[in-house]
């Protein structure tokens, strides 16, 4: 029997080759990212040993040299990078330079802790929630702005989201904390669980975590909602002007079907790519809101690592962040492939 | 200046934190109602910007680690409220007449929290660990002065020094004692003990959740008596604004306030009713130091003239919102070593102009800037980035010096660049910096003429044979009267010669919820008697699950 669709098996093969190719391409990209990051970090003034040794009258120059040797800082930077790379290939990010000298991976993904208390999981979880929130809020807003172009709703949301886009996240976060944490006293101000968390029932625990997550997720997705609703609006406006939409309308389809069946799917195309590209922004944003809300995620760890020039820790988080970004882009492309038959056929 | 604070002073805060009993406070208790009897219970939540990294005191470099480790470990000695040294784990000690041998007699029956008795073996084990070259500790130097350490019996620890060393006694604080039965033969840098320490102090580590909090429970068998507050939570909140909101909403009981929070934001009825604020000097000072090798600043009269032209009171009022005091020398006012009778250089423009004239600086071309031999009096003061109070101080000094015809430029530099490129290479005319000082008055490293090599701390190149001799004298005797005499004289000389203009001593300004009682503020702060703090039964907020 003949495959009714043209080139069925062939297309599957194409897809696999395409995926393999993309995965393979990720390796040099990742290598480049780590190389540049490593050198930039080492070029930044300051050393990990500064915390222990600068302006401490009790430390002798010999002791300082000993500390630097201990961290391998006495070797040239390219040698240090070689040593680092050799370890990372084996998925070993080395030990942190902070005084506890724990393995970096244990700090990021501590298997002794519950899943919900592991830093990478926390950051990942909040970002996924934010992304979901952005998606379900921004798209309807974008659609109605587009379909009701120049209406009062469109104008109001435009102004509103421009304000949201321009507002510094940390300031916005503090305002919300004051409103909901102090004046209304509805939500906790910071942290990831309450003092009495251990005493709560399971449903109580879930509710407690949820309450702690409301403000951070809202703040971290606010800018995203603002941006994506604008993208969605313009993407939709462009699609509506296309001939096939006119055709659909001419066929006598209802406006609802035209918009949600024919236009939406095409308009979403651009959004999928952008969502993939927004991953690094979200991870970067984690550094800010995790610090403001005292959320023990990877961003907070990164900030502390940068402040103490903890090179292995900073590099470890950057590498993981880069991998997540690349994977995010790949997923976006795959999503694109599913949504757009033209790409599938290629 | 982070690094400076972190290592030098906080070592001492660790000692202060060790708790104590039966102290007689020199200052009256703030507002303890006499009818309240101390009771057990409740939780104290302290907010901290940083997270501890390691709970072995000798390996810790940051203040957060020392804050927490200080509650878990005690030392042989500690500071009393009047800054004299008193016994902690040591019942008493003898110093040989030549000052070379210190013999500590330990208290009997003190137990590690796992039930094993603490003996002199644990002390010598800790000592051997800290001098071991494989131990990466920044505090080694003091212990390398020890020639011989021995334990004549279970409760006696004896150390012999090469030369008498006055600060020696205080080095036997809480950095040193470690449980031998748990750590012997293990690599101290890799052991699990660092995150699960067993101590003998007032609190026991219960749970440490990275990035969130460290929970400590009271040690019911603490050798100075069970602490009243059952639980101490060290909550990590990296953002200071968030921490203040948590304080306001009751999520935090204690934190350090910034000057603006102390004077303005907490000056409301809500805060007055629910909180108590404290204020005491921090053991540090900010100064303007001159490069004494520079041809202009070689002349003592020029330095004195600049000192007269600066209004220190104004700096305290503007930069610190009045939360500090003008400095007159390298010691904190109201301590035994502080000499109140030195020239204080009160703001006096006439004297300043007079001195400059004597030194040959005059405005001959009438452009408002002094000149001498055709050169204009224009120089640059450098300070480090990230310390706003220093930058603001520099601006005020700039404004004042303009009035006597000196043009001062300000350059703010990133810390490492500042130290490596300017301080170490002596490429500076003047700097504005600060020192955190130990409670012991020994400042040999800062003023002795032998300490002028690169990376050493007499970077202004101060050289005075009399001061050298007095510094030597001060650190070689345990006789407090003799030390006082030496350090009083040093302060007189420094005031006369002005190698630094001592600007101000800032105040620490902690705030604490009003339900906590038993706080006795002293020169060394408030936390020293933490195990004696309590909350009256009817005011207790947190109930403990047993």
Image (cartoon, helix red, strand yellow):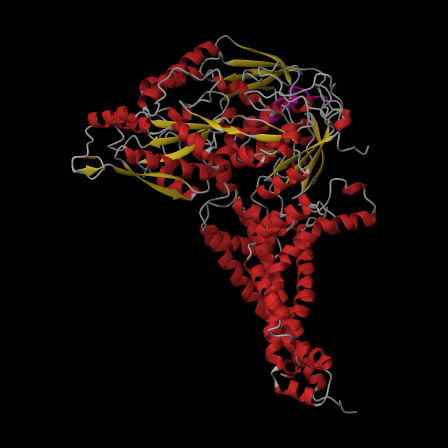
Q: Residue furthest front?
A: A152
Does residue A165 appear to the left or right of A13 in the view shown? left
Does residue A73 appear to the left or right of A100 in the view shown? left
Q: Is residue A257 visible?
A: yes
- What range of the chain is rendered magenta? B117-128
Of the 4 image quadrants, the one containing the C terminus of chain B is: top right
- The number of numbered badges drawn on the structure is 0
Coordinates of residue B235 in the picture (x, y in percent): 66, 38
Question: For the point 48% across and 9% down, which residue is it?
Answer: B98
Question: For the point 73% across and 86% down, which residue is it?
Answer: A253
Coordinates of residue B303 in the picture (x, y in percent): 29, 28
Question: For the point 50% across and 26% down, which residue is it?
Answer: B283
Q: Is residue B184 visible?
A: no
Does residue B169 appear to the left or right of B366 in the view shown? right
Coordinates of residue B167 in the picture (x, y in percent): 49, 19
Q: Residue furthest bottom?
A: A1
Which is more toward the observer, B367 or A282? B367
Coordinates of residue A272 in the picture (x, y in percent): 64, 71
Q: Is residue B69 magenta?
A: no
Q: Main secondary structure of the magenta part?
A: helix
Which is more toward the observer, B190 or B48? B48
The vertical placement of A123 against B495, above or below, is below
Which is more toward the observer, B426 or A135? A135
């Amino acid at each position: 029997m003949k495959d009714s669709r043209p080139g069925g098996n062939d297309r599957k093969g194409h897809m696999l080759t395409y995926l393999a190719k993309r995965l393979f391409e990720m390796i040099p990209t990742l290598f480049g990212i780590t190389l540049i990051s490593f050198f930039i970090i080492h070029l930044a003034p300051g050393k990990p040993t500064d915390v222990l040794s600068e302006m401490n009258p009790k430390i002798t120059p010999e002791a300082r040299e000993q500390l630097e040797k201990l961290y391998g800082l006495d070797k040239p930077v390219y040698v240090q990078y070689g040593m680092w790379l050799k370890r990372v290939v084996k998925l070993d990010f080395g030990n942190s330079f902070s005084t506890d000298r724990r393995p970096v991976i244990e700090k990021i993904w501590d298997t002794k802790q519950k899943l919900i208390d592991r830093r990478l999981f926390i950051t990942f979880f909040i970002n996924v929630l934010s992304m979901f929130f952005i998606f379900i809020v921004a798209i309807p807003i974008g659609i109605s702005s587009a379909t009701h172009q120049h209406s009062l709703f469109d104008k109001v949301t435009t102004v509103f989201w421009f304000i949201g886009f321009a507002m510094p996240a940390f300031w916005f976060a503090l305002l919300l904390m004051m409103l909901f944490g102090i004046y209304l006293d509805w939500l906790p101000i910071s942290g990831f669980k309450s003092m009495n968390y251990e005493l709560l029932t399971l449903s109580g625990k879930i509710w407690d975590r949820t309450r702690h997550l409301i403000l951070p997720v809202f703040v971290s997705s606010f800018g995203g909602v603002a941006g994506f609703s604008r993208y969605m609006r313009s993407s939709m406006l462009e699609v509506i002007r296309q001939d096939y939409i006119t055709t659909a309308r001419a066929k006598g389809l209802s406006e609802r079907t035209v918009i949600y069946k024919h236009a939406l799917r095409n308009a979403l195309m651009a959004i999928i790519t952008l969502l993939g590209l927004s991953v690094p922004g979200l991870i970067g944003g984690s550094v800010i809101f995790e610090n403001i809300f005292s959320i023990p995620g990877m961003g907070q760890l990164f900030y502390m690592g940068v402040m103490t020039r903890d090179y292995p820790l900073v590099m470890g988080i950057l590498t993981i962040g880069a991998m997540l970004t690349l994977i995010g882009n790949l997923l976006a492309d795959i999503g694109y492939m599913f949504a757009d038959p033209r790409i599938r056929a290629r | 200046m982070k690094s400076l604070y972190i290592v030098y002073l906080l070592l001492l805060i660790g000692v202060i934190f060790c708790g104590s009993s039966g102290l007689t406070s020199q200052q009256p208790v703030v507002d303890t109602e006499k009818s309240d009897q101390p009771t057990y219970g409740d939780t104290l939540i302290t907010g901290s910007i940083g997270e501890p990294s390691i709970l072995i005191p000798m390996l810790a470099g940051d203040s957060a680690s020392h804050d927490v480790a200080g509650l878990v470990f005690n030392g042989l000695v500690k500071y009393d409220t009047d800054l004299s040294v008193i016994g902690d784990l040591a019942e008493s000690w003898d110093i040989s007449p030549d000052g070379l041998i210190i013999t500590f007699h330990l208290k009997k029956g003190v137990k590690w929290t796992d039930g094993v008795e603490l003996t002199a073996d644990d002390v010598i084990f800790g000592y051997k660990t800290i001098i071991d070259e494989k131990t990466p500790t920044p505090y080694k130097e003091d212990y390398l002065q020890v020639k011989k350490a021995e334990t004549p019996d279970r409760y006696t620890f004896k150390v012999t020094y090469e030369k008498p060393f006055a600060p020696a006694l205080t080095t036997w604080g809480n950095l040193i004692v470690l449980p031998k039965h748990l750590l012997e033969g293990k690599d101290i840098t890799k052991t699990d003990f660092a995150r699960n320490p067993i101590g003998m102090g007032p609190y026991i580590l219960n749970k440490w959740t990275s990035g969130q909090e460290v929970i400590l429970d009271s040690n019911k068998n603490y050798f100075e008596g069970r602490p009243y507050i059952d639980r101490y939570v060290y909550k990590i909140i990296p953002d200071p604004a968030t921490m203040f909101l948590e304080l306001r909403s009751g999520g935090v009981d204690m934190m350090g306030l910034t000057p603006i929070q102390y004077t303005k934001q907490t000056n409301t009825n809500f805060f007055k009713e629910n909180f108590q604020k404290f204020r005491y000097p921090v053991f540090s000072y900010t100064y303007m130091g001159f490069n004494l090798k520079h041809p202009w600043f070689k002349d003592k009269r020029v330095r004195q003239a600049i000192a007269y032209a600066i209004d220190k009171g104004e700096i305290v009022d503007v930069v610190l919102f009045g939360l500090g005091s003008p400095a007159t020398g390298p010691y904190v006012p109201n301590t035994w070593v502080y000499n109140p009778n030195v020239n204080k250089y009160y703001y006096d423009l006439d004297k300043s102009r007079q001195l400059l004239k004597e030194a040959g600086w005059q405005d001959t071309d009438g452009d408002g800037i002094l000149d001498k031999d055709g050169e204009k009096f224009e120089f640059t003061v450098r300070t480090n980035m990230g310390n706003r109070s220093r930058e603001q101080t520099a601006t005020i000094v700039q404004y004042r010096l303009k009035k006597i015809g000196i043009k001062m430029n300000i350059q703010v530099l990133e810390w490492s660049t500042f130290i490596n490129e300017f301080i170490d290479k002596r490429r500076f005319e003047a700097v504005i910096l600060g020192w955190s000082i130990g409670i012991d008055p020994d400042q040999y490293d800062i003023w002795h003429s032998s300490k002028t090599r690169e990376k050493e701390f007499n970077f202004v190149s101060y050289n005075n044979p009399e001061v050298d001799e007095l510094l030597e004298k001060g650190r070689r005797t345990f006789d407090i009267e003799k030390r006082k005499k030496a350090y009083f004289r040093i302060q007189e000389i420094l005031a006369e010669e002005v190698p630094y203009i001592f600007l101000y001593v800032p105040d620490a300004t902690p705030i604490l919820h009003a339900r906590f009682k038993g706080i006795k503020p002293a020169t060394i702060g408030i936390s020293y008697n933490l195990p004696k703090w309590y909350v009256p039964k009817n005011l207790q907020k947190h109930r403990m699950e047993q």
